[in-house]
Structure formats: C-alpha cells, structure tokens
Image (cartoon, rainbow, N blue to C red):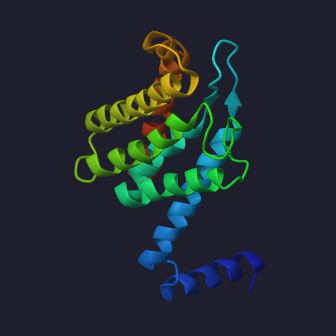
Amino acid sequence: MMKKELIIDNLNRIINKKLIVNPLLLSILGIMTFSILTALGAFIHIPLPFTPVPITLQTFFVLLSGLILGQRDAAFSQIAYFLLGGLGVPIFAVAGIGLMSVTTGYLIGFIFAAWIVGKLTIENKSLLWLTFVLIIASALILVFGSVWLIVFLDISLSQSLFLGMFPFIIGDVVKIFLVLLVYKNLFN
C-alpha cells in the first residue's frame, strides 16, 4: 500500500470510529481554531498614522466564526482569545497592560459580534440576510471600539468616530465580502 493510501485508510478508520464526529470534540476544536485564527489575524495589521487602532484581519475571523460555529461556540472562541491575551499571551494587535489597551472595546465587541452572527444566521442563510447580519455585527464591533476610545483616551464622540470608526468602514466592507465568498464557496 502506498503512503498516501495508508494515510487515507487511517483517516477513514478514525472517522468510522467516530472520534472526529464527537460533538464536544468538534465544539472544542472549533473554538480553539477560531481563537487561533483571530490571534493570527491580529498579526496581519496595518498601522494608520492618525489613529492608535490598526487595521487587522481579526474581524474576518470573528464574523466567519459566527457563521461556521454558531452563536455559543463563536462567542466562546472570542472569549478564549480575549482571556488568553488578558493573561499575557502576546496575541493582541496593540499591546497593553492585561486587558487594558486602546483596542479593548473592539475585543469585547468581537464576542458580541460573533454571538450575533451565529444567533441570527441559524435558520436564514440567504445572501441578503447574511450580508445584513454581517454589516450589523461589523458595526457593533466599531461601536464598542469607539465607545471604549471615549473612555480610555478621554476624547469626544466626534474624535472617537474619526479615530475608531470611519477609517475602518471600507476595510470592513471588503472583509464582509470576503467572509461571504469563503462561506458560500466552502461551507454552503
């Protein structure tokens, strides 16, 4: 038997023994996977000279987690990411002291956005509905981030919108398009 056939044969045996289809194991793997992907998304960042908040790929994974994992596991994946970073694992796009950084509001928004996407897309997977839900979830992240900037930087609402919301709208639209593209082509 060739090596490739042996690997396929072994994978088939594992699947037939239902080691991979165990719901709890799948849930844990999904949570871990999207926590890691969100962390990796933090390392793909573009600093902007006029704001302390960088553009990252994190929201792509946050939104995708909601579509793939569902509300509970998507939220848990973002809670796990948040807690790991809060414990000092260097996985946040912007360094801070524990959970206190300029991007903390966005990180909290990740949890709620992932949950909202999972909750609102359980039954309706039409392209129009998915687009609407992803726009709402992205806006939610930006609102949490902007409100946090008001508190953390002691700035006005208009300043927080300029620093924490407006620069990210075009990028979020692109990420929403990419999430829809990936989801529709790979998972639907």
Query: Can residue 26 be seen from the camera position used here?
Result: yes
- The one nearer the camera, 98 or 11, is 98
Number of marks: 0
Q: Residue at x 69, y 42 (%)?
A: 97
Q: Quadrant of residue 163?
A: top right
Q: Residue at x 32, y 39 (%)?
A: 130
Q: Position of residue 16 (x, y in %)?
A: 49, 86
Q: Quadrant of residue 127?
A: top left
Q: Residue at x 38, y 36 (%)?
A: 137
Tell which residue pokes out farthest to the left in this image: 123
Please identify the quadrant where the N terminus is shown.
bottom right
> Where 23 sits versus 79, above or below?
below
Q: Position of residue 157 (x, y in %)?
A: 43, 14
- The one nearer the camera, 34 or 88, is 88
- The one nearer the camera, 49 or 45, is 49
Q: Position of residue 3 (x, y in %)?
A: 77, 79
Q: Position of residue 169 (x, y in %)?
A: 47, 20
- Left or right: 105 with respect to 44? left
Query: Can residue 185 be seen from the camera position used here?
Result: no
- Left or right: 169 with respect to 112? right
- Left or right: 100 with respect to 151? right
Q: Residue at x 51, y 61 (%)?
A: 31
Tell which residue pokes out farthest to the right in this image: 3
